[in-house]
Amino acid sequence: MIAALAVADFRERSRRPAYAVVLLAAVALGVLALPAADSHWQIFQLGDYRGRYSSVYAGTVTALAGAVWLSLAGFYVVKSAVALDVDTGVGQILAATPLRRAPYLAGKFAGNLAVLASMTAALAGTALIMQLWRGEDRHVGPLALLAPFVLITLPALALTAAAAVLFETVPGLRSGTGNIVWLFLWMTGSIGLQSGGGLDVFGMGHVITSMRADVGDRRPFDFGVGLVERDTPLKVFSWSGSYVDAGFLAQRLVLLAIAVALAVLGALWFHRFDPARAMPGRRAAERPTEPTTRWELPAHRPATPARLAPAGFRLVRTSLGVLLAGVSKWWWAGALTLNLIAAVAPAMLLLCWVWPVLLWSRLGIQDIDVLAAYPRRRTRLVATWLAGVLLTALAGAVPLIRQVSTGDTRDAAAWLAGALFIPALALLLGSLTRSPRPFQVIYLLWWYAILNGGDPINFMAAAGPNPALVAAVALTLVLLTATWQELKHSRR
């Protein structure tokens, strides 16, 4: 039964567009992992050095890069296995079988791991092609090339597959909150784990120790996985690939055991598709209730100057109501607290404009049932975007007031451009994918880069790009969204 669940889950996931996107990104990562000899860029950082492109070096470097990248992107590909069974009704059929909770979750874990393993196989093929293409060492050692993917990448991805199952069963982590929690866990964990301290999840510590010994340079130098630029071409050394020992193998087995335990641990919270124990939010959504607020769409009448403004205003108000549906008072309390702190600390705008990320990710998705009845698609699109702009303005109102009161026109202009850009990006990604996850991941990674000193991409401050350029990009994104919707409508 576990094998049948895993195979069915793999077949369903491998047909999704998100699978193809992440798979292509993994292949591109494999190409970047082995740059040209005269390149100043590198994925695997080892100071001013890189190994000769032998099978063991090509396989190990690509496996390390894949472990780091797929542990993030792969999580969002596989984190919907249980929810899909709930939405499609398959779970109710499974509930009528003798299949118990732990074996069901084990099957979902195996399916998640199979999806991630197929991406790992694509990385391994890319490493082989790149080794032959670069031509520094055309002798192919199959075991030396493939072993890093089995020993380094797969155990790390097993933790990712297990975390996806666990997040789908623990209350509070099933929704977009879990997506954000995993992103922050990945960002903090990938930095800490690359130091090789404690349990070496990525195997980085053992690999670095072996490479240091073969380089012979005792001076301290940077190491890790991440795209960086060097001023001079890298020095080449020959690496023996001697990083596997009894301690390393024991750690990989421990990682697999932890992954299985995490996946099965979800059985403590898993409702096994019992409607009486299902997700409270889902039960509330399925239970017919009287609406507490009545949203009225403007009637489709000939557009006259007297009617255009009120109709547009009502549509924006309706769009904002849909966007803010279900927002609790605690969310508003958090937004107010951040704004009050920003009154004395201008840099807090960065925190003010990460707080509504789950609400922004609804743009282009949540208006399917309520606003789709309005006949003018372009007007509806603009109203949805303006509702997002209003939400952004509310979330960062105090920093703007402070900038205007102090006469800081450049930062105020950057604030206005950012308020236009964020919902435009969310609207485009939501319309293209019909999923909140792409925006959540892309925006939070962007935000994290700004937090770590990424001034060239900081659209929230005057130190970043020209506000006029940011505003123009925002309008372009809205136009692209409108074009996409028109193309989609023309196919019907």
Image (cartoon, rainbow, N blue to C red):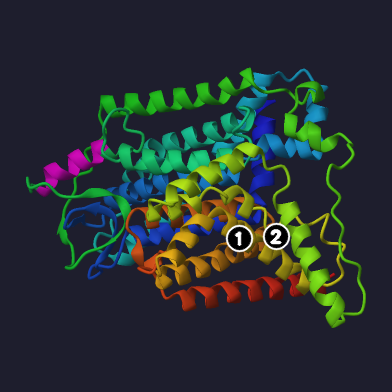
Would you place residue 71 above or below residue 420 in this image?
Answer: above
Q: Position of residue 117 (x, y in %)?
A: 51, 42
Left or right side of 459 for 306: right
Amino acid found under the numbered disc labelled 1? Ala
Q: How far from the left and from the top, in percent, is residue 483?
A: 70, 76
Residue at 36% x, 51% y is 62
Q: Which residues are magenta?
A: 205-215
Residue at coordinates 57% horizontally, 60% vertically from top-left?
A: 393
Q: Nearer the viewer, residue 368 or 472?
A: 472
Quarter occupied by residue 247:
top left
Element on which disc 2 rests: loop
Decide: marks 2, 1 in contact (CB < 8 A)?
A: yes
Residue under numbered circle 1: 426
Looking at this rendering, what residue extends furthest in the bottom direction?
305
Rendered location of residue 19, percent (x, y): 59, 52
Secondary structure under tag 1 reads helix
The residue carrying mark 2 is 364
Q: Residue furthest front?
A: 405
